[in-house]
Image (cartoon, coloured by chain):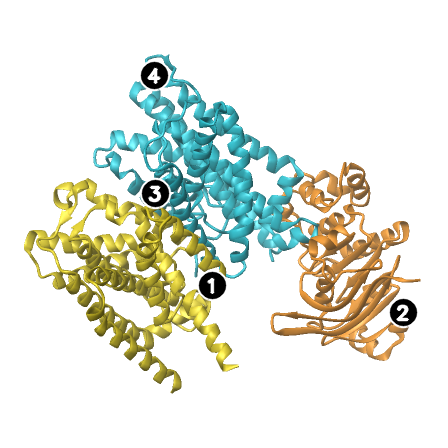
C-alpha cells in the first residue's frame, strides 16, 4: 500500500511540475524541456525492451528515423494533422519492430547488439537510395512548423499517455510474461509462456515508442528530416539514456531522458567545453563514469537507497 | 613433523550458502591424505578453499605461509596443483598444449619435466598433437594428472579422480599417484567417493559430513571404525 | 563443465564442418580467378576488394580477440583505431618518418588498449555485461569528441606509405598501395598467429579466454591476459586504421565508422570466436562489396552499409556461428 501511495504521489508531483513549468521558464528552455520529453518516450520504449525481456538494442535510432520520416513525408505530401502522423508512425514502427523482432528471437546478447547496431547505421541511409520519395541527402520538410510550446505540450502529453499505456501493459499478463522472460528464459518456456510471441511483442512496442519519439524529434528539428539527423549517435544516446535510467523506474527514465536531453546543452554553456565536440567529450566521459559507479543506473541507485532506508 | 598444509576453522560459502562450517585438517609432507564423505558434504569445497577458488575465511597455511589472500594463480605459483572435478583440462587445446600449460609457472625449458611425465604416461607422448577433447574420459583424467605433475608440485589436490573411470584405469591412476608419492615425496590430498580405494592409497583420512569434520585418523583407525565401515565401506 | 562425450562430439562436428566450408571458399576463389582472367575490371575490383577486405579483416580480428577474451563487443574498436591513426599523424607532424611513427603508434596502441581494459572494462565486467557494452559505447562518443576537439574535423593529409606506383599486369592496373595494404595485414596476422601458437604468453591468453577458472589453476594471471588481449586488439586496430587511411586519401574523424560495420559483418561471417574466420570474412566482405556494387545495379555505393547489414542478418539466420565459429549463438 505504501508503495502504491508513494508512486501516485510521485506521479502527481511530476504532473504538477510539468503543468507549471511553461509559465516559469524561457522559450529556449521550453524547447529543451520538450527535447527531454522526446527522449523520455524513446528511453521508455527501450527500457521496456531491455528491462523486461533482457534484450538489448542499439538500433532504436532507426525506428526514430522511420517515425520521423513518416511524419515529414505525410505532412509534406498530404498536410496531414501532425498528431495523426504520430499515430501512424506508432503503427508503422510497431509493425517494423515486430518484423525485426522475428529474427531477433534467435539471437543472444552480443549478436543482437551487433544486428541492431548495423540496423541503426543502415536504415538512415535508405533515403539516399529512394531520393525521389524520401528526399535523398536534402531530406524532407514538413508543411508547417510548430512552436516550442506546442512541442512541449504534445511531447509530455504523449509521454504521459505512453507511460500509462506501458504501465497497463506491464502490470497485466503481458508484463508478467516479460519479467519471466528476463529472469529466466528456460523457466519461462517451462511454464508454458510462448517466448517468441512476447519477445517479438516487446520489440514491436519498443519500436513503436521510438517511432513516436522520432516524429517529435523531427518536429523539434524545425520539421526537418534527413539522414544526417539520424546518425548512429542518436541510437547511442537512447541506449545511454536507458542505461542511466536503469530498469523499471519512472524516475530512472526521467533521469535518463534528462541526462541525454540536457547534458549536451548544459555543458555547452560551460566555458572551455563550449564547442559541439567538447560536449561529446563530456557526454562520453559522463556515460563511462555513470556505468562505473552505477552499473544498474538510476533505478539501481534508488533501489539501493530504498533498501538502506528500510534497514 | 610440521604439517605441509594446515587448515584451521575454515568456513566457505557460495554466495549466501555456507558450505563449510569450520574445517580443520592437517597434511604432513610426503603423505597421502584422503577426504571422505557423502555428496554435498563439502569435500570439493574444501579443495576449492585451499586453491582459492571459493570465498573462504579461517586460516589456511601452506609451507609456513598463509594462503588466505592468495588467489588460484598464486596458489599454483606456490607449488600447489589442483586437479578439479571435471578434470580442468582444456578440451580445445592439444595434449601438448595442455601439458605446456601445466608448466606455465616454470621458467626455462620444460623438456626434462615433459620427459619425466612421459615416462609415467608413455601413451601420452604419441598423442601429443591430438585435441584433448577427443580423448576418452579416462585418458583425459590421466592427462589432467600428467599436467599437474609437470609442475612438479609440492602438494597435489585431487578431486574425485575415480569419477566416471573404468576400474582398471582407476587402479592405474592410484598406482601412479602412489609411485610419485614414494619416489618423489609428493604430498597428496585426495577427495574420493570410493572410500575403499582411497583408504588403501592413503596414510590418513578425514571424514566430512555437512561441512564439518566428524572423524579423522590414520587409515587403519578409519578402516576399523564401525561408522565408516557401515557408511562408506559397505560392511 | 564439458564432459568427455560432448567434447568429443564437438571435435568431430568441427572436423566435419571445416572441410565443407573450405571447399566453398576454394570454389569462390576459383570463381574470382576465372573472372579476373576474363575481365580487367573484375580483376581490379577483386584486387581492391582484397586489399580493403584485408583491412576489414584485421579490424574484425581485433573484435574477435576482444570478444573471445572478455565476451564483450567493443563498439569503440573503430574509433580507437581512428584515434591511433591520428596519433601517428601527429608523430609525423613532429618529425618522425612514416614507419617510425607506425611502430611507435603500434606500441602506444598496445599500452592504450591494455590500460582501457584495466581501468574501464574490468571494474564493470564483473557487475553487468550490458554495462560493459555501454562503456564501449561511451568510449565511442568520448574518443570521437576528443579527436574532433584536438585535431578538428577537417581533412588531414598523411604521407602514403607505399608511394603511388601502379603496376600493369596483363592489362590490369594494380596499385602498389593495395599490395602493401594486403601484405602488411597478412604479416600482422601471421605474427599474431605465431604469438598464439608458439609462445607461452599466447598459450596463456588462449587458456584464459577459453576457460578462465582452469587457467587460473595452472597459474595463469587471467586478468592480465584479458588486458593484454585488449592491448593486442588495439594494436591490430591501429594497423587497420593506418592501412585504411591511404585508401580513403584523407584522414578525418569518420574514417573508421563504415569500416567498423564491415568489420562486424566480417566477424559475424567468420564466426565471432574464430580469428581465422575474421580475416577470411573480411576478405570475403571486401571483395563482395566491390563486385556487388559494380555488377548489381540495384545496389549502389550508398547501400554498402545496408548490404553489410544484410550479410549479418543472413549469416545469423542461416548459420549463426558463422563459417568457422563454434560457440552457441542462440538462446532458448
Q: CA distance from mark 2 to mark 1?
A: 54 Å
Q: According to the rendering, which colour does chain C have?
A: cyan
Q: Which residue is mark 2?
A: B218
In this rendering, the label closer to the viewer, 2 or 1: 1
Please report contact status of discs 2 and 1: CB closer than 8 Å, yes or no.
no
Find residue A65 and report its horizontal and vertical position in percent: 23, 52
Could you tell me which secondary element the residue under label 3 belongs to? helix
Please report contact status of discs 3 and 2: CB closer than 8 Å, yes or no.
no
Quarter holding the N terminus of chain C is bottom right
Q: Which residue is mark 4?
A: C173
Instruction: Tell me what residue is drawn at x 49 percent, y 40 percent.
Output: C62
Q: Which residue is mark 1?
A: A294
Find residue B1 and report its horizontal and vertical position in percent: 93, 62
Q: Which residue is mark 3?
A: C311
Please report contact status of discs 1 and 3: CB closer than 8 Å, yes or no.
no
How many other residues sit within 10 Å of disc 1, few (<14), some (14-19) or many (≥20)?
Answer: some
For residue B227, the mark is none
Instruction: Tell me what residue is drawn at x 26 percent, y 74 percent.
Output: A17
Q: CA distance from mark 4 to mark 1?
A: 56 Å
How many other residues sit within 10 Å of disc 2, few (<14), some (14-19) or many (≥20)?
Answer: some
Q: CA distance from mark 1 to mark 3?
A: 36 Å
Could you tell me which secondary element the residue under label 4 belongs to? strand
Q: According to the rendering, which colour does chain B have?
A: orange
Instruction: Tell me what residue is drawn at x 11 percent, y 52 percent.
Output: A142
Q: Nearer the viewer, residue B232 or C299?
A: C299
Q: Nearer the viewer, residue B102 or B22?
A: B22
Q: Judge whether A162 appears above or below A57 on screen.
A: below
In this rendering, the label closer to the viewer, 3 or 4: 4
Q: According to the rendering, which colour does chain A have?
A: yellow
Amino acid at each position: 500500500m505504501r508503495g502504491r501511495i508513494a508512486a501516485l504521489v510521485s506521479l502527481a508531483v511530476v504532473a504538477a511540475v510539468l503543468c507549471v513549468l511553461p509559465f516559469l521558464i524561457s522559450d529556449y528552455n521550453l524547447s529543451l524541456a520538450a527535447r527531454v520529453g522526446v527522449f523520455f518516450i524513446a528511453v521508455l520504449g527501450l527500457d521496456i525492451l531491455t528491462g523486461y525481456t533482457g534484450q538489448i538494442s542499439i538500433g532504436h535510432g532507426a525506428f526514430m528515423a522511420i517515425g520521423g520520416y513518416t511524419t515529414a513525408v505525410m505532412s509534406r505530401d498530404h498536410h496531414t494533422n501532425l498528431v495523426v502522423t504520430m499515430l501512424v508512425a506508432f503503427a508503422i514502427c510497431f509493425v517494423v519492430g515486430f518484423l525485426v523482432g522475428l529474427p531477433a528471437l534467435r539471437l543472444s546478447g552480443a549478436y543482437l547488439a551487433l544486428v541492431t547496431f548495423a540496423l541503426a547505421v543502415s536504415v538512415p541511409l535508405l533515403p539516399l537510395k529512394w531520393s525521389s520519395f524520401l528526399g535523398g541527402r536534402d531530406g524532407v520538410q514538413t508543411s508547417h512548423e510548430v512552436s516550442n510550446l506546442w512541442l512541449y505540450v504534445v511531447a509530455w502529453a504523449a509521454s504521459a499517455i505512453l507511460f500509462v499505456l506501458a504501465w497497463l501493459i506491464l502490470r497485466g499478463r503481458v508484463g508478467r510474461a516479460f519479467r519471466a522472460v528476463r529472469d529466466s528464459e528456460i523457466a519461462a518456456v517451462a511454464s508454458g509462456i510462448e517466448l517468441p510471441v512476447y519477445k517479438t511483442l516487446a520489440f514491436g512496442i519498443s519500436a513503436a515508442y521510438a517511432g513516436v519519439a522520432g516524429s517529435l524529434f523531427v518536429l523539434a528539428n524545425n520539421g526537418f528530416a534527413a539522414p544526417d539527423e539520424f546518425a548512429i549517435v542518436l541510437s547511442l544516446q537512447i541506449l545511454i539514456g536507458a542505461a542511466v535510467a536503469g530498469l523499471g523506474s519512472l524516475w530512472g527514465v526521467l533521469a535518463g531522458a534528462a541526462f541525454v536531453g540536457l547534458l549536451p546543452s548544459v555543458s555547452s554553456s560551460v566555458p572551455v567545453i563550449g564547442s559541439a565536440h567538447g560536449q561529446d567529450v563530456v557526454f562520453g566521459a559522463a556515460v563511462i563514469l555513470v556505468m562505473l559507479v552505477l552499473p544498474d543506473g538510476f533505478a539501481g541507485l534508488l533501489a539501493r537507497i530504498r533498501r538502506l532506508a528500510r534497514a | 613433523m610440521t604439517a605441509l598444509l594446515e587448515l584451521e576453522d575454515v568456513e566457505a560459502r557460495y554466495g549466501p550458502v555456507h558450505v563449510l562450517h569450520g574445517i580443520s585438517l592437517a597434511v604432513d609432507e610426503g603423505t597421502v591424505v584422503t577426504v571422505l564423505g557423502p555428496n554435498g558434504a563439502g569435500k570439493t569445497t574444501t579443495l576449492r578453499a585451499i586453491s582459492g577458488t571459493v570465498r573462504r575465511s579461517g586460516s589456511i597455511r601452506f609451507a609456513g605461509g598463509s594462503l588466505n589472500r592468495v588467489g588460484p594463480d598464486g596458489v599454483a605459483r606456490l607449488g600447489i596443483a589442483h586437479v578439479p572435478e571435471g578434470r580442468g583440462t582444456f578440451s580445445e587445446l592439444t595434449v601438448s598444449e595442455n601439458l605446456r600449460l601445466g608448466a606455465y609457472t616454470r621458467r626455462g625449458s620444460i623438456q626434462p619435466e615433459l620427459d619425466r611425465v612421459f615416462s609415467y604416461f608413455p601413451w601420452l607422448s604419441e598423442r601429443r598433437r591430438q585435441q584433448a577433447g577427443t580423448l576418452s574420459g579416462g585418458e583425459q583424467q590421466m592427462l589432467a594428472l600428467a599436467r599437474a605433475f609437470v609442475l612438479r608440485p609440492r602438494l597435489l589436490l585431487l578431486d574425485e579422480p575415480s569419477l566416471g573411470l573404468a576400474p582398471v584405469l582407476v587402479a592405474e591412476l592410484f598406482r601412479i599417484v602412489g609411485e610419485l608419492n614414494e619416489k618423489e615425496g609428493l604430498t597428496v590430498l585426495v577427495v574420493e567417493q570410493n572410500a575403499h580405494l582411497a583408504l588403501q592409497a592413503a596414510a590418513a583420512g578425514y571424514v566430512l559430513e555437512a561441512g564439518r569434520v566428524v572423524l579423522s585418523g590414520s587409515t587403519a583407525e578409519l578402516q576399523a571404525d564401525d561408522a565408516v565401515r557401515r557408511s562408506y565401506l559397505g560392511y | 563443465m564439458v564432459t568427455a562425450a560432448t567434447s568429443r562430439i564437438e571435435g568431430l562436428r568441427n572436423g566435419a564442418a571445416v572441410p565443407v566450408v573450405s571447399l566453398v571458399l576454394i570454389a569462390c576463389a576459383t570463381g574470382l580467378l576465372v573472372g579476373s582472367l576474363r575481365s580487367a575490371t573484375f580483376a581490379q575490383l577483386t584486387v581492391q576488394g582484397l586489399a580493403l577486405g584485408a583491412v576489414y579483416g584485421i579490424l574484425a580480428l581485433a573484435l574477435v580477440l576482444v570478444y573471445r577474451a572478455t565476451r564483450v563487443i567493443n563498439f569503440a574498436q573503430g574509433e580507437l583505431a581512428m584515434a591511433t591513426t591520428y596519433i601517428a599523424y601527429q608523430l609525423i607532424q613532429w618529425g618522425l618518418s612514416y614507419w617510425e611513427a607506425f611502430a611507435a603508434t603500434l606500441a602506444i596502441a598496445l599500452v592504450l588498449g591494455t590500460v582501457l581494459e584495466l581501468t574501464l572494462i574490468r571494474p564493470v565486467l564483473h557487475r553487468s555485461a550490458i554495462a560493459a557494452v555501454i562503456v564501449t559505447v561511451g568510449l565511442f562518443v568520448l574518443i570521437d569528441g576528443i579527436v574532433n576537439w584536438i585535431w578538428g574535423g577537417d581533412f588531414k593529409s598523411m604521407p602514403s606509405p607505399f608511394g603511388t606506383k601502379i603496376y600493369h599486369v596483363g592489362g590490369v592496373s594494380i596499385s602498389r598501395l593495395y599490395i602493401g595494404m594486403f601484405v602488411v595485414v597478412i604479416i600482422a596476422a601471421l605474427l599474431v598467429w605465431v604469438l598464439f601458437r608458439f609462445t607461452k604468453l599466447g598459450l596463456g591468453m588462449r587458456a584464459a579466454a577459453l576457460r578462465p577458472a582452469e587457467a587460473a589453476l595452472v597459474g595463469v594471471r587471467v586478468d592480465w591476459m584479458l588486458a593484454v588481449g585488449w592491448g593486442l586488439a588495439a594494436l591490430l586496430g591501429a594497423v587497420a586504421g593506418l592501412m585504411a587511411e591511404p585508401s580513403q586519401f584523407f584522414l578525418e574523424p569518420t574514417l573508421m565508422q563504415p569500416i567498423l560495420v564491415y568489420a562486424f559483418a566480417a566477424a559475424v561471417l567468420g564466426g565471432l570466436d574464430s580469428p581465422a574466420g575474421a580475416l577470411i570474412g573480411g576478405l570475403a566482405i571486401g571483395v563482395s562489396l566491390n563486385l556487388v556494387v559494380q555488377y548489381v545495379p540495384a545496389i549502389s555505393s550508398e547501400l554498402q552499409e545496408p548490404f553489410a547489414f544484410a550479410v549479418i542478418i543472413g549469416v545469423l539466420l542461416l548459420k549463426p556461428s558463422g563459417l568457422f565459429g563454434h560457440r552457441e549463438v542462440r538462446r532458448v
